[in-house]
Image: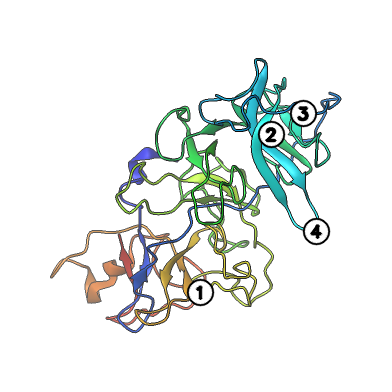
Amino acid sequence: MKRSLVVVLIVAACGGDDDGPSKIIDAMPVIHDAPVDAKVFTDAKQYMDAPADASGACNPLTQAGCNVGDKCTWLLDALAPQYVGHIGCAPGGTGAVGDPCMYGAPGVTGYDNCQRGLVCSNYRGGTGTCKQICDQQGGSPMCSAGNVCVVYSGLFSTGVTTPAAGGVCDTSCDPLADNDFDGSGALTKTGTTCGTATSSGCYGYPSFGTPPVTGWSCTTDIHELVAQPIGLRHRVRCTDINGCADPGPVIYVNSCNQGYLPLLRESTTVSTAVCVALCKPKNCYSGNCGTANVDRLGDMPHRCNDTDAVGTFDTTANGEHCRY
């Protein structure tokens, strides 16, 4: 992420008039779905049975509560019939940041081969990469420059209604340059931080004034292949019926396609979340907003219209605006 964009783009998105999406979601869980890393696991380390916790509980941020040589991490209990895990102690591994990693079989071997203070990104089984554990509230441990602390769905979970005990450091990115706003075709990415594949985008969510400030990170576009006329893009409802949300509905930061966020409610009276296009604001104020107030749509190539993005846009005088 280019840090200079953080303030401008905390909530810079296309919004309609009073009849369109108008209410910012104020309680969206800031969580990402589990990413799928492409690196091949090559470590031949044999997994040992995890020893009992030193005190029955431990802290993944401070690494307190485990025996000497062990680590406080996320342990995999079961993959089926439902995913189950918990925070506990396990033998310290050898994998450094960026190294390939893998969890052992669920149960007594359900831990990864990453070093103390790190965790395997693919904690739902399969191969992943070792990532630094961080405090998503802005405390210690913090991520290094070029990274941002994010929370993954189910990782370091402390309960359904309580915040996760920790996050992981993901590569920071530019939400305009590192997103493919139409999935394929002419409007491709101009940045390479998150790679050139359409399956990887740059996601973030407003902090609403609560530290730490909004960060943007490279994350999997989990619904890249959703079969809809316009996918999960501007003004498309984010529900479990169309596959955008999990049953509940449970909505993630990366529920919508890259370049779009589940940022607004459908209206002040309807609580359904709506995918909204990110945009680049342009100077626009009374009497100084271009011919026919065209600058209200933002600055090309990231304006609130169907030339720069995909979806249903209202380009009338009182229609879409690029707001932040």
Q: Nearer the viewer, residue 286 or 80?
A: 80
Q: Dots 4 and 1: beta carbons under 8 Å? A: no
Residue at the location (69% across, 73% down)?
A: 227
Tell me the tag on residue 50. 3
Residue receiving disc 2: 129
For residue 81, which numbered disc appears in the image? 4
**Cα gap from disc 3 to disc 4, whole angstroms:** 23 Å
Q: How crowded is mark 3: few (under 14 residues within 10 Å), some or many (20 or more)?
A: some
x and y percentages locating residue 106 in the rendered image: 80, 42
In the depicted structure, whether residue 313 falls above or below residue 180: below
- The residue that mark 1 highlights is 311
Q: Which amino acid does label 3 sit on?
A: Ala
How many marks the image carries: the answer is: 4
Could you tell me residue 302's position as x and y percent? Answer: 41, 60
Pick whichever of labels 4 and 2 is earlier in the sequence: 4
Q: Residues within 10 Å of mark 4 (few under 14, many from 20)?
A: few
